[in-house]
Image (cartoon, rainbow, N blue to C red):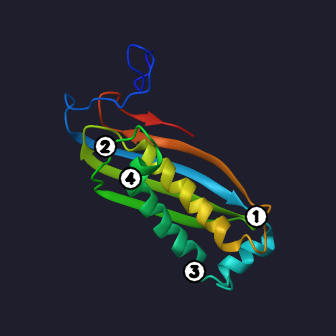
Amino acid sequence: MALTHFDAAGRAAMVDVAGKDETSRTATARGRIVMEPATLALIREGRAGKGDVLGVARIAGIMAAKKTSDLIPLCHPLMLSKVAVDLVPEGDDAVAIEATVTLTGRTGVEMEALTAVTVAALTVYDMVKAVDRGMRIEDVRLVHKAGGKSGEFHGR
């Protein structure tokens, strides 16, 4: 299988999508941030000094999806139709994060969904790092992709 982000001479190149059909495309990514139980309790109870941690992280994830092409050099700037980011406490020591991104266009939105999850997790870290510097961002991955020539993908 040929890698699409390299030209014939092996140099990095942006993929030309001009000849592709516009189709409905969607991607969903997931990840989690693991922390001390006391840190999650602080978040759940709304006692973090910087405000609504999960609400701010949700907005950060949405903004990050919209700015993916500014962060990842060979990503196309896209007119996204929808970005949904959900952060849900999981057990007594983690927050599960899921982002779904959609558009009608010529290229997929996998990178936008992955970026949304990652930046949402980084925002949680930033907002409560004063009480828990040992938090871990884990298991960021693409779990679903649909649309385009390559069709559908289901991950775990």
Label 2 or label 4, whichever comes before in sequence order: 2
What kind of residue is marked 2? Arg
Disc 4, SS: strand
Query: Counting other residues with Cα less than 10 Å from the Cα at mark 3, is it few (<14), some (14-19), or many (20 or more)?
Result: some
What kind of residue is marked 4? Val
Q: Is residue 2 above or below residue 129?
A: above
- Identity of the residue drawn at 57% across and 72% down: 54
What kind of residue is marked 1? Met
Residue 126 image point, x, y percent:
65, 68
Disc 1, SS: loop
Q: CA distance from mark 4 to mark 1?
A: 27 Å
Q: Which residue is mark 2?
A: 25
Label 1 or label 2, whichever comes before in sequence order: 2
Q: Which residue is mark 3?
A: 52
- Identity of the residue drawn at 45% across and 17% down: 10
Residue 15 image point, x, y percent:
33, 29
- Identity of the residue drawn at 24% across and 46% down: 104
Q: Which residue is mark 4?
A: 101
Q: Are marks 3 and 1 in contact (CB under 8 Å)?
A: no
Drawn side of residue 88 relative to residue 4, left or right? right
Label 3 or label 2, whichever comes before in sequence order: 2
Q: Is residue 37 above or below residue 119?
A: below
Numbered marks: total: 4
Q: Are marks 1 and 2 in contact (CB under 8 Å)?
A: no
Q: Quadrant of residue 82?
A: bottom left
Q: Which residue is mark 1?
A: 35
Q: CA distance from mark 1 to mark 2?
A: 34 Å
- Identity of the residue drawn at 53% across and 55% down: 117
Drawn side of residue 72 relative to residue 42, left or right? left
Q: CA distance from mark 4 to mark 3?
A: 23 Å
